[in-house]
Image: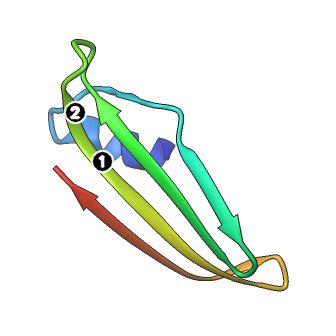
Amino acid sequence: MNEQAHQIRAQGMDGVFEKPVFLANGDQAVVEWSLRKEDGTVIQRGIDLFTLRNDKILVKDVFRKA
């Protein structure tokens, strides 16, 4: 997420990532995240979907909403 934070700041936005929520079941995992301004306004939120195999990431899809 540090790279994403850098990209967001480069676009003139600044904020704080909330503690992400991690969910996993077998070879599927989900990370839910939010980026907020200091006043609590949500800048962006999203989910990362992972397919795992042999303890490695096979596929990663990212969905975000501004």
Numbered circles on residues, count: 2
Q: In the rendered view, does 13 fall on the left or right side of 1? A: left
User: Quick check: 48 above or below 41?
Assistant: below
Residue 19 in percent (x, y) is at: 53, 33
Q: Which residue is depicted at the point 25% across and 19% down?
A: 40
Residue 10 in percent (x, y) is at: 23, 39
Residue farthest to the top, as pictured: 39
User: Quick check: 45 above or below 30?
Assistant: above
Q: In the rendered view, does 64 fall on the left or right side of 11? A: right
Q: In the rendered view, does 26 fall on the left or right side of 48? A: right
Residue farthest to the front, as pictured: 25
Name the residue that disc number 2 marks.
Answer: 42
Q: Quadrant of residue 53?
A: bottom right
Q: Amino acid at mark 1?
A: Arg
Marks 2 and 1, how far apart in space? 7 Å
Q: Which residue is depicted at the point 33% across and 36% down?
A: 35
Residue 12 in percent (x, y) is at: 15, 33
Q: Secondary structure at mark 1?
A: strand
Give yes or no for contact between labels 2 and 1 (Cβ–Cβ under 8 Å).
yes
Q: Which residue is depicted at the point 82% across and 76% down?
A: 55
Q: How is the image coloured?
A: rainbow
Name the residue that disc number 1 marks.
Answer: 45
Q: Which mark is residue 6?
A: none
User: Quick check: 21 above or below 30?
Assistant: above
How packed mark 1 is, by other alpha carbons closer than 10 Å (few <14, some 14-19, many 20 or more), is some
Residue farthest to the right, as pictured: 54
Q: Amino acid at mark 2?
A: Val
Q: Which residue is depicted at the point 36% across and 40% down?
A: 34
Q: Secondary structure at mark 2?
A: strand
Residue 57 in percent (x, y) is at: 67, 78
